[in-house]
């Protein structure tokens, strides 16, 4: 695999991939969290890798990173770019042919992953990364930003899967949970230092 699949130094978080909604959601805490996370990433010198849109929480997050002097890499499929507005303020806005290429490139560009509130697409991206970690295909930290308790039903579902015997101790789903965006970067750095490597991902085409 290419160089983009490993971190240069254990614990070094250079770029974080953030999954979040292309809608703002009904709770104003969601947009406030996206704005605060963008400011934190910029202040900590951590680049943002995300889906490239200018709508909803995606747009709030990206605009906040840029407004606070940070770097944004947006990766958007061609068909979505025709339907949505790409964030033209990104230092790098990459158009790719399909979703598989987008997800692969987002993985390669990132040292860690964060899920803010979002819809089905956000859920799918989060669960894919959790599956890869569960199967030992990479050790990049995955953090669930449980803003206003948004992700608690999912966390309860994971607990239910454990009690029903579908998540075995030897194949535990490993993730971090933060209720405040101020904790995100520090938690990611600590987890990356413990992991010390990235591993090799599954081919997203499979």
Image: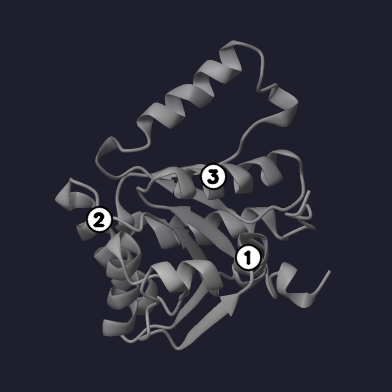
- The Cα atoms of the two marked residues, 2 and 3, are separated by 18 Å
Chain-order first, disc 3 or disc 1: 1
Q: Is residue 193 left or right of residue 203?
A: left
Q: Is residue 189 visible?
A: yes
Q: Residues within 10 Å of mark 3 (few under 14, many from 20)?
A: few
Per the image, label 3 sits on a secondary structure element best described as: helix
Residue visible at 45% across and 43% down in the picture: 120
Residue under numbered circle 1: 98
Q: Do the CB atoms of the residues marked 3 and 1 lie less than 8 Å apart?
A: no
Kindly indicate the quadrant of the structure image that contains residue 147: top left
Residue under numbered circle 2: 24
Chain-order first, disc 2 or disc 3: 2
Residue visible at 40% across and 57% down in the picture: 184
Per the image, label 1 sits on a secondary structure element best described as: loop
Q: Is residue 27 above or below residue 10?
A: above
Task: Report the quarter where the N terminus lies.
Answer: bottom right
Kindly indicate the quadrant of the structure image that contains residue 20: bottom left
- The Cα atoms of the two marked residues, 2 and 1, are separated by 24 Å
The one of 161 and 46 positioned closer to us in this rendering: 161
Q: Is residue 87 left or right of residue 103?
A: left
User: Measured from the top left, where is residue 165 in percent x and y?
Assistant: 66, 13
User: Measured from the top left, where is residue 136 in percent x and y?
Assistant: 76, 44
Q: Residues within 10 Å of mark 1 (few under 14, many from 20)?
A: few
Which numbered tag is attached to residue 124? Answer: 3
Q: Is residue 170 above or below residue 41?
A: above
The one of 153 and 178 positioned closer to us in this rendering: 153
User: Measured from the top left, where is residue 28 in percent x and y?
Assistant: 15, 52
User: Measured from the top left, where is residue 117 in percent x and y?
Assistant: 35, 48
- The Cα atoms of the two marked residues, 3 and 1, are separated by 15 Å
């Amino acid at each position: 695999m290419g160089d983009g699949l490993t971190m240069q130094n254990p614990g070094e978080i250079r770029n974080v991939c953030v999954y979040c909604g292309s809608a703002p959601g009904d709770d104003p805490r969601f947009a406030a969290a996206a704005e605060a996370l963008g400011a934190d990433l910029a202040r900590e010198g951590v680049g943002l890798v995300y889906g490239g849109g200018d709508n909803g929480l995606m747009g709030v997050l990206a605009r906040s990173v840029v407004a606070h002097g940070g770097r944004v890499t947006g990766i958007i499929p061609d068909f979505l770019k025709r339907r949505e507005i790409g964030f033209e303020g990104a230092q790098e806005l990459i158009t790719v042919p399909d979703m598989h290429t987008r997800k692969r490139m987002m993985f390669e560009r990132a040292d860690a992953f964060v899920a803010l509130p979002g819809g089905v697409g956000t859920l799918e991206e989060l669960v894919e990364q959790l599956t890869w970690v569960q199967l030992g295909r990479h050790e990049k930290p995955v953090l669930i930003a449980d803003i206003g308790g948004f992700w608690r039903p999912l966390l309860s579902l994971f607990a239910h899967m454990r009690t029903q015997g579908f998540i075995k101790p030897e194949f535990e789903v490993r993730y971090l949970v933060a209720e405040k965006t101020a904790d995100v970067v520090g938690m990611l750095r600590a987890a990356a230092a413990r992991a010390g490597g990235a591993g090799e991902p599954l081919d997203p085409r499979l």
